Amino acid sequence: MWACKTSARFFDASPDALIAVNADGTINMANAAASKLFGYRRDQLIGSDHWLLVSDGFRNETRLLQEHLEAQPDEAPLPREVYGLRRDGTEFAAEVAGALLDNGGSQVLLVSVRNTEHGTRNTEHGTRNTEHRKGADANLREAMSLLTATL
């Protein structure tokens, strides 16, 4: 019992967001920093798909991280750069690292998420709103169409 309480305190004491992900992609544990970083209560995170927390273009990164850890368990991979996704829809630059843990016969991917923006964007929390992308994407498609038509 003491080891369990100590582990839980250590888990919550981490300044980085820590998330344990089951083989099916569901979150089975999240620390206080994860709750704060992503804007969800812990009970909202647990049982949710971990992709809820990753921007669309980066959802493959956790699978690649897990594959690396399975193929080369003695070699710690370098942190991967991703964009996290908060509950309010804002994205933030982050790096993720991970480790595979044995959870009584099944493996759990423990992911550490660190915000790498430190308040350099639109808000004091280092976030950026993605609403601007809709217009920019439409303008880019139009420009590519015009360029293609002139070639």
Image (spheres, helix red, strand yellow):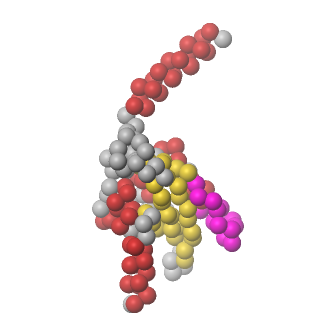
Please name the residue shown 51% across and 22% down the image: 141
The quadrant in which the N terminus is found is bottom left
Residue 71 magenta: yes
- The magenta segment is 66-80
Please name the residue shown 45% across and 23% down the image: 138
- Which one is in front, 58 or 106? 58
Would you place residue 150 above or below residue 81 in this image? above
- Which one is in front, 33 or 88? 33
Would you place residue 116 above or below residue 13 in this image? above
Residue 128 magenta: no
Residue 52 screen position, x and y as percent: 41, 52
Residue 132 screen position, x and y as percent: 40, 31
Please name the residue shown 69% across and 65% down the image: 71
Left or right: residue 41 compared with residue 116: left
Quarter of the rendering containing residue 48 = bottom left
Q: Is residue 132 shown to the viewer in this render? A: yes
Q: Is residue 89 shown to the viewer in this render? A: no
Left or right: residue 39 compared with residue 102: left
Residue 36 screen position, x and y as percent: 34, 60
Quarter of the rendering containing residue 121 = top left
Would you place residue 115 above or below residue 148 in this image? below
Q: Residue furthest top?
A: 150
The quadrant in which the C terminus is found is top right
